[in-house]
Amino acid sequence: MVNPMHKNTKRRAGAAAIALTAVLAMAMSAPAQAAPDKPHPNTPNGPTMDIQLLSFNDFHGNLEPPTGSSGRLVVDHQLNADGIVESVNEDVGGVEYLATHLAEARKGHPYSLTVAAGDLIGASPLLSGAFHDEPTILAMNALKLDVSAVGNHEFDEGYKELQRMADGGCIDDGDGMNNQNSCPDGVFPGASFDYLAANVVRAGTDETILPAYTIKNIKGAKIGFIGMTLKDTPAIVTAAGIAGLEFRDEVATANALVPVLKEQGVNAIVVLVHQGGTPGQQTWYHDGKAYQVAPSYDAACANGAQLDPTSPIIPIAKNLDPAIDMVVSGHTHQPYVCDIKDPAGHDRMVTSASSFGRLFTDTTLTYDRRTQDIVRTSVKSQNMLVTRDVAAAPAETAIIEHYQELVAPIAHRVIGQVVGDVTRTQNEAGESQLGDLIADAQLADSSVVGTAPGTTDKPVIAFMNPGGIRGDLGHDDAGNVTFGDAFTVQPFNNYLVSVSLTGAQIKQLLVEQWSGPNSASPKVLQVNAGFHYAYSPTTKQLGEVTLNGVSLQDASTYRVVTNNFLVGGGDGFPTFLEGTDVYYGGLDIDAFAAYLTANSPYTPGPLDRITLQ
């Protein structure tokens, strides 16, 4: 069970310790708002108070307004000239605007809390990632975040680094070595909000690595918040970062904490969980005719939207203790507002606000002071666009401008040129130009060749997971690519690793692309030039696999290079764990940058490494 005594009672250092600008210090040192309490399913039977809960998820360090498709959301639909339904999109997001929208939403609500459901950091743009995501934590402090669960990306740099994000302090990273620099101002205060990880414990103990829950009190009204990441986090993060940890079941963890909170007089309980759902298609009507369309940002189950029945959040929501009044979810980067019945048959609100700070959810609820609980039928939620037509929040602007100046020498360094666009768009077989480039860069990196027995052979095969390619490769009109452009593509600072695998094991890896955990959503690994295989997307059968035109031999051993995430069995590829003579090289982003420099101007080749049969 979770350690019930590990709750958040620590008072962290204030933001005044950060000497950015006077306006930043003033905004970040403002007192955080308190939290209320709520009654249960039916009607109130005592004096009540109204409470507001503002929530978001999967921010991923997007301080500046995200660009391209990452900075847009569907707001409506229309028929084009050919009578085909098209989505109407709006540019949204940017922490300067998120902070302003949250401040505006709080007006008229004296009792308001702001919470998040994980992945605040990790897979972040260079502006935050170059400083170990310290700027994002400062930005969350400035917008007056009260509580957040951890997500899987909070573990990208290891759990001790996550603890530093919560508690503050600096690390000695060589003052800019590896294009990262902790504490450029000499101090980092950590989060002024409560970071929760109820279902993450040290293996063999009940000791959580961060508080399991926190209790917010507004004029005697108490609300308990339980924060959790998804139990499957070990399958999607680097193994080294979570060594010695155990990730427990979300439902069992939360339900075990209910009596712990009740013992402290807390009947109003909200779960913040980094697991989510995917909305199904939405029905859109035009001139009386129904069309099935992609859901818009404000899709709500009460208005005909629905979650895909296979969504992982559904069984979680259905089995959480009825004493839990609301679920704020994340991870899938989807927008939805849905009631899901609890084990007692009562509707329970479950929300998610897309990602990258493009949305926030505004929830209103009634707290019954006599029952000290939330009136379940009073809970109303709506997703709200973070439009860019409002004034930018000065405190957030100060953070962005400060780190823009600090990151400029890294971000603006030109590392090479490209001829035309190099994108992550996959063809029918699942191959992409950018995937090819990254795999070739991995294969060319000399840092993965060691001196110990078994590690001295240069790799001959490279694998890159498509989920690790986070954006297309940017360039200017002359084709110049900067380090910042490259970092947008590979923001994880993963290490390259070489391992020895047999031909049979490599073929099994290829089969794992569409089987096991990947059966519902295949993940096609990107491969280097000279390596080729064919497969049938209908029968899921692997065809011939060749290396430089020669069939791969099951009993032969091949040296393979990939990243430490895949070597740890991530993304549903457990066969990587069978690799021998494991040798760690340098950072993937450095290999990518060096390859582009050595092969400029780079022209993408034909997509013929993976074919269909």
Image (tube, rainbow, N blue to C red):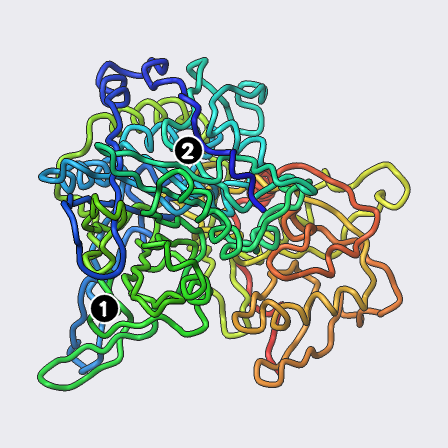
Work out whether residue 263 or residue 101 is closer to the camera in this orientation and state it.
263
Q: In the rendered image, which quarter is residue 29 located in?
A: top left
Above or below: residue 344 compared with residue 375: below
Instruction: Determine whether the residue tagged by mark 2 lies in a helix, strand or loop.
Output: helix
- Badge 2: how crowded within 10 Å, few (<14), some, or many (20+)? many
Quarter of the rendering containing residue 190: top left
The percent coordinates of residue 199 (x first, y second) are 54, 46
Query: Which image quarter is the C terminus in?
Result: bottom right
Name the residue beneath numbered marker 1.
87
Amino acid type of the residue tagged 1 in the rendering: Ser
115 shown above or below 403: below
Tell me: residue 585, above or below residue 578.
above
The x, y position of residue 291, in whole percent, is 22, 82
Q: Is residue 593 visible to us here?
A: no
* Position of residue 566 measured from the top left corner of the image (x, y, whole percent): 65, 53
Q: Which mark is residue 128?
A: 2
Residue 161 occupies which quadrant of the picture? top right
Residue 516's tag is none
Residue 368: % across, % down: 20, 48
Name the kind of residue labelled 2 in the image.
Answer: Ser
**Which sits earlier in the primary sequence, circle 1 or circle 2?**
1
Residues marked 1 and 2 touching at CB (< 8 Å): no
